[in-house]
Image (cartoon, rainbow, N blue to C red):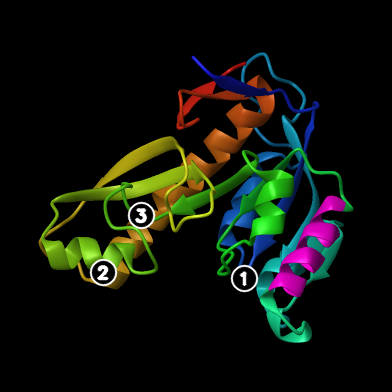
Amino acid sequence: MAAQSFRPARPARLVVLVSGSGTNLQALLDAVAPGREARPGDADPPYEIVAVGADRRGITGPERAERAGIPTFVCRVQDHATREEWDRALTEATAAYAPDLIVSAGFMKILGRRFLERFGGRVVNTHPALLPSFPGAHGVRDALAYGAKVTGCTVHFVDDGVDTGPVIAQRAVEVLDEDDESALHERIKEVERGLLVEVVGRLARDGYSLEGPEMRRVRLGS
């Protein structure tokens, strides 16, 4: 069976990409903040956030990083003549921090070919549905419209499709009769933050491998 293993440095170096308020970023920051409750037998943080990148200005995500003393950078599509040039600039800006893992924490841009060639198998994303069901920008709305009784969130690696990368972990959320899109999405986001922190910690702490003919099976621990 084909396999590709990753064993990050310890602590693993993370670059986090954001487009908005940065609540997932804050959860990742809180998990390794001084005074945190450490995992049994794991006194040292499994990762450090070495930089936070954004695709726009005037958002609160980078402000969270700056308050924590973490470098930030902005790479806007409109500042580049083509999407390919933006992809190159984002790749170079991210690579400057020598990350072991990149976390797309509410980053609302599709990552380009050059970025994925450079960091393939190391870019983590979240999605508010149980993939492969309800991919795309409206996963919560689509689950409600379909009449699903259970939805949830998925943490997965990013590939060149839309929410098609290998699944790392999933967690279910019940759809209540009184749910509208906003209420359901808020409950999913609460679960999503916890799952993201847990998954990133395990990837950083234990390493992982991608297995199978199409490298779609994720095994934590390498």
Q: CA distance from mark 2 to mark 1?
A: 20 Å
Give the residue displayed 74% in from the left and 47% down from the top. Answer: 118
Residue 48 coordinates in the image, percent (x, y): 78, 40
Q: Which residues are magenta?
A: 84-95
Q: Look at mark 2 in the image and give the residue it sits on.
A: 141
Residue at 70 percent across and 45 percent down: it is 119
In the image, what residue type sits under mark 3? Ile
- Quick one: 76 or 64, which is closer to the camera? 76
Tag of residue 188: 3
Indicate the amino acid at tag 1. Ser
Badge 2 crowding class, 10 Å Cα cut-off, few under 14, some 14 to 19, many 20 or more, is: some
Q: How much space separates mark 2 and mark 3, taking CA atoms? A: 12 Å
In the displayed structure, 117 sits above or below 184; it is: above
- Label 3: state its secondary structure: helix
Question: Residue 83 at x, y = what percent?
Answer: 67, 75
Of the numbered discs in the image, which one, if any, rests on residue 7?
Answer: none
Residue at 62%, 24% in the rendered image: 4
